[in-house]
Image (cartoon, grey):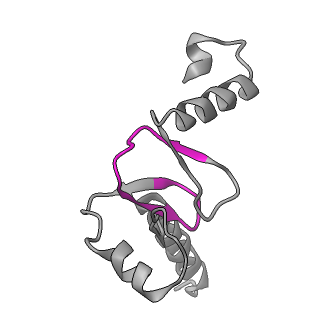
């Protein structure tokens, strides 16, 4: 999206600015179960879901679990500073793609009828 407005901007410049915005608390940096860093404009405490097939990340529209940090504090001697919760699954697009592939395989396996 940035390249449409600034066609010559480097990826390094984009990521440096994302890191700065994250340090300032204006966006949040997501460290999910994937190699790539993700950034979220929603800085309120909320949970995410990541597609195990394509890596897509989306918000999970539920309230944060009340008391989870207090429960964790009672179960460990760590000094907790917060928590993150990531759900994993398969997104609707990948699920549909998988269904189409399975249907194609089933169709190929059917013997031709005379």
- Eyeballing the image, is 17 above or below 65? above
Instruction: Identify which residue, 13 or 109, lies in the foreground.
Output: 13
Residue 89 location, x and y as percent? 47, 71
Instruction: Identify which residue, 63 or 57, lies in the foreground.
Output: 63
Residue 34 location, x and y as percent? 65, 60
- Eyeballing the image, is 79 above or below 49? below
Residue 11 location, x and y as percent? 72, 28
Count of all numbered marks drawn on residues in the image: 0
Residue at horizontal 62 percent and vertical 35 percent from the top: 19
- Eyeballing the image, is 7 above or below 51? above
Instruction: Identify which residue, 85 or 10, lies in the foreground.
Output: 85
Residue at horizontal 60 percent and vertical 78 percent from the top: 108
From the viewer's perspective, is 55 left or right of 66?
right
> Residue 33's quadrant in the figure?
bottom right
Instruction: Identify which residue, 37 or 53, lies in the foreground.
Output: 37
Residue at horizontal 62 percent and vertical 11 percent from the top: 6
Residue 36 location, x and y as percent? 67, 51
> Residue 13's quadrant in the figure?
top right
- In the image, residue 40 lies in the stretch drawn in magenta: yes
Residue at horizontal 57 percent and vertical 83 percent from the top: 112
What stretch of residues is rendered in magenta? 38-57
From the viewer's perspective, is 7 left or right of 22?
right
- In the image, residue 30 lies in the stretch drawn in magenta: no
Looking at the rendered image, the quarter that the N terminus falls into is top right
- Eyeballing the image, is 105 above or below 11? below
């Amino acid at each position: 999206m940035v390249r449409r407005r600034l066609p010559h901007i480097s990826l390094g410049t984009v990521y440096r600015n994302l890191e700065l915005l994250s340090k300032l608390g204006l966006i949040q940096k997501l460290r999910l179960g994937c190699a790539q860093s993700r950034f979220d404009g929603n800085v309120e405490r909320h949970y995410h879901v990541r597609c195990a097939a394509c890596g897509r990340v989306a918000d999970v529209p539920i309230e944060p679990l009340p008391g989870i940090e207090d429960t964790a504090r009672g179960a460990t001697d760590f000094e907790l500073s917060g928590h993150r919760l990531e759900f994993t699954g398969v997104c609707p697009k990948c699920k549909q793609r998988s269904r189409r592939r399975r249907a194609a395989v089933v169709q190929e396996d059917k013997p031709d009828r005379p």
